[in-house]
Image (tube, helix red, strand yellow):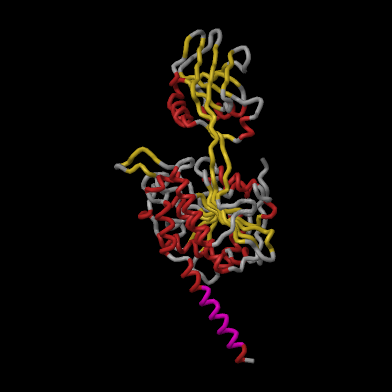
Amino acid sequence: MLKKLLSSFLLLLLVAQVSAQDINKIINKTYVDDIIKTLSSDAMEGRATFTPGIDRAATFIEGKFKKIGLKPLTGLKGYRQTFYKYQVKPLSATVSIDGKNVAPENVLVLGNTATTLSFDHTNSAGWTKLDPEKPFGPQYRALIESNKHQLVLVDQKFASIFKQLKNRSKNGSYVDEKDLKKVETGGLVFVLTQDTVAKDFNVAVKNTVNKMPLFNVAGVIPGKSKAKEIVVFSGHYDHIGILPAVNGDSIANGADDNATGTSAVIALAKYYKKLNNNERTLIFVAFTAEEMGGYGAKYFSEQLNPEEVIAMFNIEMIGKESKFGKNAAFITGFERSDFGKILQKNLEGSPFTFHPDPYPEQNLFYRSDNATLAALGVPAHTISTDQIDTDKLYHTVDDEYDTLAAENVLMTIKAIAKSAISIIKGEDTPTRIPKLEL
């Protein structure tokens, strides 16, 4: 009996050793570094949405998924999950008040999705003026939410904010097809420096509308006994592209944000494919357009039945040591489900620890790509190590590979790989998050 127990113990020890050896072979520094370096290279031009750079990044990720042996999402022939947005871009805006034309630089149009818009004092909500004695923000938001055709006069006191909004509006807005087909669309026209309308006004606006393709990159490892239950591993692969040059450098390479998270998604796919013990279906997805408002994650989430999604591991910026020191990461929304507790349980005996989000004032839980599924009740959380309150490289041209702590990336990926095991094998099911009341 003692001999049998000893043999069993040695066998278990051998299995544990082989498993540890496997993860170190499969998820190693060379493999992870190659992904980060490629995605954050100058050749990718900052991976801005709708640019050749993001297309090259998508092709690179597709190649990795193919080599790993992932399957495409159901109904797709390849790894790109393509969808479309419509860019409504201002072409011209003519405003006359009491017979005098307003200078174009003092006109800003917001909220209109039609190719043409014209109104005057007789067929609109008329005109109004922002109160210079009150904060700009609440007045602005109330007008935007009103969805009216209206002329809005802006006092010189708000000139700086007006110019910022006008600069942001140069590339137009991105809307869904259903927004273009609305019978009634808003159309606020802001005019700077005008004090009043004595008699009448006329507005004439023209826009161009272009259909723009976007693409998530996604692959699947089908489950076995619990194939209808889904676990998602995700990270966004887009960044912000080209910025005004700083010391001759204009490319915002986005090494930490979020080549690190994307490298984690790819490395985890490789690991779990080799492990081949997932009872649940695993989806690995690199999201597009996170920087523009989470368009990629939103579209992806809409294609799923949220009741079938057991958990989501969204990985964002793991390139530097966390506030909690080495071998530590934080989980947004830690208190909203027992997701974090399950991960920590699976890391018992390991030096790595997961912690609650130390930046609750930043509202990070609903600011990343986990938000859409979390709002639908899925235990969807973001894992990060970024010290966001002191990170001076965030959204700058200096977010490059050589600023990263490569070992931090590697240790975090391995910790996620080990801590998720009981969830992918169907042994643990995180509690659902209360649905967000909209």
Q: In this orientation, which residue lies closer to the viewer: 418 or 299?
A: 299
Q: Would you place residue 71 above or below residue 369 in this image? A: below
Total labels drawn: 0
Query: Which part of the image, by quadrant, shows the N terminus?
Result: bottom right
Residue 7 part of the magenta-drawn span: yes
- The residue at 52%/24% (across/down) is 109
- The residue at 62%/18% (across/down) is 125
Place of residue 226 in the rendered image (x, y in percent of width and height, measured from the top left)? 69, 63
> Start and end of the magenta stretch?
5-19
Residue most extreme to the front: 77
- The residue at 62%/89% (across/down) is 4
Place of residue 423 in the rendered image (x, y in percent of width and height, measured from the top left)? 62, 63
- Residue 155 visible in the shown view: no
Q: Would you place residue 424 above or below residue 7 in this image? A: above
Q: Would you place residue 212 above or below residue 24 in this image? A: above
Place of residue 436 in the rendered image (x, y in percent of width and height, measured from the top left)? 66, 45
Place of residue 45 in the rendered image (x, y in percent of width and height, measured from the top left)? 40, 45
State the predominant SS element of the stretch in magenta: helix
